[in-house]
Amino acid sequence: MYQYNNKDQTLINERVAQFRRQTERFLKGELTDDQFRALRLMNGLYIQTHAPMLRVAIPYGLLNSKQIRKLAEIARKYDKGYCHFSTRQNVQYNWPKLETVPDILEELASVQMHAIQTSGNCLRNTTSDHLAGVAPDELEDPRPYCEIIRQWSTFHPEFAYLPRKFKIAVSASKTDRAATQFHDIGVHLVQNEVGQTGFKILAGGGLGRTPIIGQIIKPYLEKQHLLSYLEAILRIYNLYGRRDNKYKARIKILVKETGVGNFTEMVNAEWEKIKQGMEVSEKHFESMKAHFVPPAYNSQAAQDSSFDDAISNNTDFATWIKFNTTDHKVDGYRAVFASLKAPDRPPGDATHQQLDAIANLADEYSFGEIRTTHRQNLVFADVEQSNLFALWQKLNALNLATPNIGTVTDMICCPGLDFCSLANAGSIGIAKQINDTFDSLDYIHDLGELKINISGCMNGCAHQSVGNIGILGVDKKGIEWYQITLGGSSENDASIGDRLGPAIAKEEVVAAIGTILEVYLQHRSQEETFLNTVKRIGITPFREKVYANS
Amino acid sequence: MQILKNQQLTENTWKFLPDDAELPDEPIDITVSLKRWIQDQEILKKYPGKLGIRLNPDDSIDSLPSSLKKVPLIEINFPTFTDGRGFSIAQILRTQFNYESEIRAVGEFMLDQIYYLSRVGVNSFALENQENLPDAITMFNEFSDSYQTSVN
């Protein structure tokens, strides 16, 4: 993975010192609330319902074991012993004290981590495929390009006070695992007709209140122009994005109101003016790629026979392999998901003990690295098949082996009313009810691939509008109600879910989900997924059943 | 009033003339809005004092004339510190209009924005609160390196 050089380390150390001064000035009354708000947000610090919340950046979701141990240590020393992995591959602490945040940032800097630009109206953490570098369907490892974008976007002097936040996601695979069609900019690695690698650029996608699918504005960008093209998009957005209404300030609204054709022309005109002199050199690409060379794989890994034996002899292990591991580009290896969706835990949370243990397991079984996923789980990307059984047993003992990846209980869930000052309704409670109700693994596995996303408000941090089943908390005269949508997807077949009908009372949500699942099981043909069934039969059969008695 | 220019405390000689104000009798240094600068060109040509332009975030920089290079001062107004259009305007003035004279930030920008502003080519700063001048001078050295090619 990328290792900081002196310049990187100096810059984050200087950032810590800067934020320490800013915090001191705020506490002395030299900065107003509004001024400090903008500055603290660009260091990941929110003031929340109970306490500040600190969001720490995990660039494109990649962590080493030393960093994981540091996250555990921070959870112990400065928080309540746990942390929460977010849908943008970052990690959040819900209970730090404002005065200690500069100390936390200093601890992070000691392991090449930071909270820079994890919030605020600026360029956010660049996200990518959690299987980057190991996915069999990958054109090329996207992470060197992610790191180039990370550096360009970090402390970009021109784009720190944008109309609204700005998120970039990069994918290099046939299957889009990074939801690139729902980002302000989606970057796809592609090949042109003569086999050169370049980028397809999408713009104007986004979730939140107005979910919109991004549109292609550059079908093929030669790779040396990556940064000048991003800069042109950002400049047009900074100058012309709406600033009169924060709900209309994202680039998706600019693209929509300007029209994608006009928007593209504006970007291209700006790009023509600036592209010369901003090229990324081949040497720079190569030096970045050198940080992401594949680890020393065992060429004999596929010779092992114990793995097949274990699958035959242990159905629980076989089930876990089926749901919680995935194919690897190297024979004899698999990528393993550690499920942060155990039924008795809030989705995406990990305790400091779990983190320390994960760090040790990463060292033992996966070249000392871990990835975070946008569905709030963790990945050991490079596990030799002969080690899978041992890893499974150890993850089981840590409550990290619930075999539910990609199933009904692998929910994306925001912190909701329990923690977040924006929320209208609880989300963790709904997730718990779903877990309590659908507690039969056989039933969960029979349902198969099914993505439920639960957000506690319109801001949609849990991406409910692209959940196969989306659940959105709304406030009706102080009472929590939930709006259900069906048929959303953030993958290649990107779509925004359709509203099932009127909002449903909290105590009836799980029964409604149960009814929806029954309708699916009645109508599905063979191996058809929930999403495909909804697409085929439409929303009406579900609506009729759920609202039959109202 | 003192301002910061090229990282030094400097006495300010400039005054902004609102659109509805008459031209001063004395030839003092004034800035006018882009609108007035374009509309009153003939009258302003005869003004004996120095003449600069004050840009607001929604001014169309495409309408700036090529004679801009001769203007001794361009002020970029920040109506609120959260409005970041001024950063792009400064960058474009320096890199696309090749404007070399003084670009001054005026209005509600924060001390904590001085470093980024100087990187996109702003080289003078008019602070609303003069008491902040000593702190402001320290802001230029917050970072010793950078990732992007920018003006500075």
Image (tube, rainbow, N blue to C red):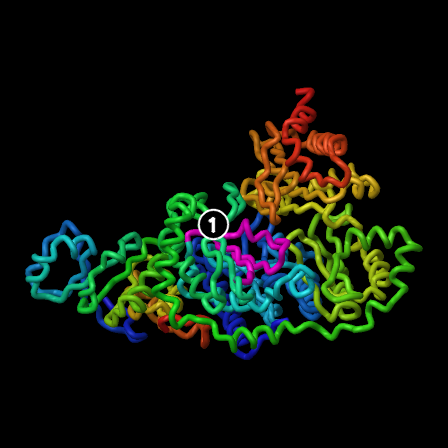
Would you say A142 lies left or right of A302 here? Answer: left
**Looking at the image, which residue sits at the far bottom?**
A6
**Residue at 58% over, 41% down:** A465
Observer able to see residue A37: no
**Residue at 29% over, 69% down:** B124
Q: Position of residue A427 (x, y in %)?
A: 65, 41
Q: Amino acid at mark 1?
A: Gly
Along the viewing direction, whichever of A461 and A528 lies nearer the viewer = A528
**Residue at 45% over, 43% down:** A247
Q: Which residues are magenta?
A: A163-192
Along the viewing direction, whichever of A267 and A254 lies nearer the viewer = A267
Say if A457 sits above or below B119 in the image. Answer: above
- The answer to whether residue A179 is magenta is yes
Q: Position of residue A302 (x, y in %)?
A: 82, 67
Task: Tell me which corner region of the image, top left, top right, bottom left or bottom right, holds residue A502.
Answer: top right
**Residue at 61% over, 76% down:** A290
**Looking at the image, which residue sits at the far front?**
A194
Chain ID at mark 1: A
Q: Which residue is mark 1?
A: A204
SS at badge 1: loop
Q: Dot 1: within a 10 Å radius of its alpha carbon, few (fewer than 14), some, or many (20 or more) residues?
A: many
